[in-house]
Image: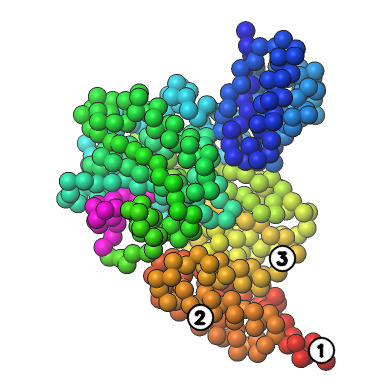
Amino acid sequence: MSTRIYVPNDSAALALGAERVVRALRAEATARGLEIEIVRNGSRGLFWLEPMIEVATEQGRIAYGPVAAEDVAGLLDAGLLIGQAGHRLHLGRPEEMDYLKKQERLTFARCGIIDPLSLADYEAYDGYRGLRRAVTMTPEAIVEEVTQSGLRGRGGAGFPTGIKWKTVLGAQATQKYIVCNADEGDSGTFADRMIMEGDPFLLIEGMTIAGMAVGASRGFIYVRSEYPDAFRRLQDAIVAANRAGFLGPDILRSGRAFNLEARMGAGAYICGEETSLLESLEGKRGMVRAKPPLPALRGLFGQPTVINNVLSLAAVPTILDKGAAFYQNYGMGRSRGTMPLQLAGNVKFGGLVEKAFGITLREAIYDFGGGTASGRPLRAVQVGGPLGAYFPDALLDTPLDYEAMAAAKGMLGHGGIVVFDDSVDMSLQARFAMEFCAIESCGKCTPCRIGSTRGVEVIDRIRDGIEPEKNKVLLADLCDTMLDGSLCALGGLTPFPVQSAVRHFPEDFNRPSAKAAAE
């Protein structure tokens, strides 16, 4: 009887040598006459332990990590196949590890556990229960369930998902679309990628339910070009779902149709903005559309379109399976359910943490992240991607909740948390925000296109000590113009990191002039 060994096929694990570990396991097993079955699962999100392999034993799955190819022979000598505890890489049962035990995993309940392309695995862990319930419900009832759950968009603005769906349901059209925004371009974010690589049927199920809810028969997943593994995994999963009757002209013999395809993105940050994404999907250059009309009324090819990101759609199967009240029981205030947080930057234990809304930044960074990787004092944290505000230590007790973050002049965004120690120069971080905007701007509106370029120049003058007070006033005025006049969130939110850096770290902008320094 063969022993089952799980080796992640997640991009993070692959980058850290997972394929070499697989080759070493197979070579050693052949040489020793051992019978093993290698299953390529996704990642559980403990990136500092990747590749983290697991072996199925009578006591459950036992983890070891981080494993390198050269560790394999020693692991087998130490009793890997029976989960022996003697080896230095032995971690024990994954679910008993503090990092995982303290989480509330709803969306990521299967990620890192199942074979991503096995429908049998997916269904064995409650997959497609939500869709099976949805086919027995009216579209209005599905929309009401999602609305009552309190689910909000996980991409940035936190707009209620049920309201968006209700708008599309009420729109009159012969063709409607579901579009998944999987153009995950924010710095320090990887949750979408983990779902697409580690649990793709979850996203497919969520999109299928959305199609039934609003009367859409076609869907598209727009995957960023930097995610080739996720793109291929989705394509394979879509083929499998079609063959099994979970997609196609007659879903679960319900008489309802939903056809889905994955599309590779155009490699531009601006295509993460929903209207630019639609332009790109239509084969045009990714440029922002003016609103109104809203995509819910005139979206893809001018038809009513639901656009949600991966995490929003991936939450839907749980809501339909367990009910709105179950999901709403998590969280705080108007932020219901769980939020997959992504810890990155100068942090000791980088990875994915799924918690109910309400956990503080400090808890996320220290209880899960273990503080800075360098061991130096933490100085700043950026939440919400490259357009998110920088928070100092004094704001780390802010709850991770849409309204609480907004009250602190920040945003939760996609849940990315990037940590910086006391060696960071915040004037350079402010400059980077303006430079990023200048590079990634689609060029359609003047405040974003020109404002960001002028922003880099103004910050350079401040850093060089050239009339710093006058240029600080100019920078503030420029930020106000971008906030109020930009056509989309790229230009409209770029001032967030700049203003927060100036507000919380003014000393980094107080430099002597070149003349004063020379004297």
Per the image, the residue denoted by label 2 is 478
Asked if one can make out residue 46 in the rendered structure from this viewpoint, the answer is: no
Nearest the eye: 394 or 466? 466
Amino acid on which the number 1 mark rests in the picture:
Ala
Q: Position of residue 474 (x, y in %)?
A: 55, 85
Asked if one can make out residue 233 in the rendered structure from this viewpoint, the answer is: yes
Q: Residue 51 carries which label?
A: none
Q: Where is residue 313 in the image (x, y as percent from the top left)?
A: 39, 43
Per the image, the residue denoted by label 3 is 424
Residue 209 occupies quadrant: top left
Per the image, the residue denoted by label 1 is 518
Question: How packed is label 1: few (under 14 Cα within 10 Å), some, or many (20 or more)?
Answer: few
Left of 241 or right of it: where is 10?
right
Q: Distance between the residues labelled 2 and 1?
A: 30 Å
The quadrant in which the C terminus is found is: bottom right
Residue 446 occupies quadrant: bottom left
Amino acid on which the number 3 mark rests in the picture:
Val
Q: Which colour scheme is used?
A: rainbow
The answer to whether mark 1 and mark 3 are in CB contact below 8 A is no
Q: Specify start and end residues of the magenta stretch as a single range.
A: 293-308
Give the answer, above or below, for where 98 lies relative to 192: above
Amino acid on which the number 2 mark rests in the picture:
Leu
**For numbered disc 3, what is the local secondary structure?**
loop
